[in-house]
Every structure is written in structure tokens, then in C-alpha cells.
Amino acid sequence: EAQVTQNPRYLITVTGKKLTVTCSQNMNHEYMSWYRQDPGLGLRQIYYSMNVEVTDKGDVPEGYKVSRKEKRNFPLILESPSPNQTSLYFCASSEKGGSPLHFGNGTRLTVT
Amino acid sequence: SQQGEEDPQALSIQEGENATMNCSYKTSINNLQWYRQNSGRGLVHLILIRSNEREKHSGRLRVTLDTSKKSSSLLITASRAADTASYFCATDRAMDSNYQLIWGAGTKLIIKP
């Protein structure tokens, strides 16, 4: 089944403790992206990747890192999480930039 | 930055009625997309309409695009309880080469049985 898989679904952590949210897609998509969703703000893009080894900042990249060493994986790294990074995070992929996005089921992160 | 803005923010209708949501944007676009999100889940792509298209259909969904007014509408006909969800429009910017999508804050649709 074609899908984007994010893990974990729920994560509660403390300020400053490094964490990684994994994202994997099995559709051989070139384009991958991370979004955060906060009430009333819609989706805001954190980072995106047009292809392997190519990543770029979105609208809200501060406090986040990504890597794209393989086509299928696009992990999101929070080196030192802070409470303002408490949010619902989505990974998405598409065949190429501009194509319809396939979303993962989300990761609800709480930083205390 | 927000480009798309959906209107209304929330809509509650009876099952069987039609639901219309609108999206406005600010800059020239290549295409506009509509997505559905069920309560906290991942978004699901509904329709993509290109800037040179005026109308597109998919099942009970009808999307129109008016580039002169920089607006789009999503019509759901004969609504069902399962259509209860939030609906988002997303646009790219024609001058951008990175295909970055700009999202609106969404319309929350509630279908009453």
C-alpha cells in the first residue's frame, strides 16, 4: 500500500532533550516536506527536499534540522526542543514539486 | 506566510444539503489544490486545478477557479456525515521555482444527520 509513515504518533518530551521524528515513503517520490500545524494558523512548512541530498528551508525552520540521505527517508530532528515546538507535525511527499501531496498520519509532540 | 484564506471558517449544514467553501489568494499561481483533514489526521488530496482551468469535477466535488478575482470555491453536493472534516486550499506562487505551497487556515465543515 502506498503510504507515508511517520513515527512516533505521540511524543512527550522535556525541554532540551534531542529527538527525531522519522518519515518514510514507499512511492519513490522525489519531493518530501515537513509541516507543523497549530490551531488557527493552518499548515506551515518547516523544511522541504526536492530530491536526495537537496534540502531547503520553509517558512519556520528555526530549531529544526532535516536530512535526505536516501530517497525514501526524511527525518526531522529537534536538537534542543522548546515548549513553543509543541505542535502537530506532518510529513508529506509527492512525485515531484508541485504534484499532489501524500501525508503521513501526523506526530503530536508535547515539549514540557 | 499565509496566501490562501478560506471562507467561512466554519460551516454547519444538514445532511443532504450542498456545502460551498471559498478560498482567496494573493499572488499569481500555477495551480490550486484542495485537501480534506479528518480530526487531527493527515490531509488527503481532493482536487488540483491549474491556472488555465476554470472548473473541475470529481464525484460530488466541484471546484471553480477565477484567476481574475484570485479565488476558488469548493462545492460538495449532497453532503454526507462522512464529509465532516476541515478543508484546506493550498496554492503555489507562479514566480517561485521551488513549488512551495501556501496554506490557508481551513474551513471546518460539520454535517448534521
Image (tube, coloured by chain):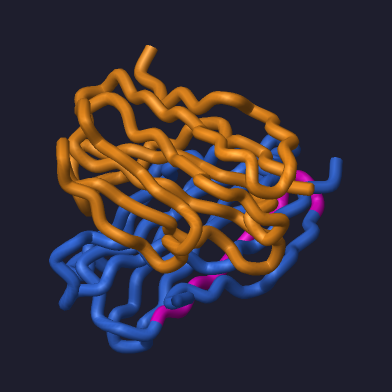
**Which image quarter holds the C terminus of chain B?**
top right
Count all numbered tags in the image, as a single digit.
Answer: 0
Residue B89 visible in this rendered orientation of the protein:
no
Residue B111 place in picture, x, y as percent: 77, 48
Which residue is drawn at the image coordinates 16% and 36% (left, top)?
A52
Q: Nearer the viewer, residue A35 or B34?
A: A35
Q: Which residues are magenta?
A: B14-25
Residue A13 visible in this rendered orientation of the protein:
yes
Quadrant of res B80: top right
Residue A14 place in picture, x, y as percent: 74, 42
The outermost residue toward the top is A1
Task: Based on the picture, tell me whether residue B24 belongs to the magenta stretch.
Answer: yes
Indicate left or right for A9 with A66 as reference. right
**With respect to residue A62, does B85 lie above or below?**
above
Residue B99 place in picture, x, y as percent: 23, 60
Residue A60 place in picture, x, y as percent: 46, 65
Which residue is drawn at the image coordinates 72% and 56% (left, top)?
A83
Which residue is drawn at the image coordinates 44% and 55% (left, top)?
B34
Chain B color in figure: blue
Which residue is drawn at the image coordinates 74% and 63% (left, top)?
B11
Chain A color in figure: orange
Task: Based on the picture, tell me whether residue A17 belongs to the magenta stretch.
Answer: no
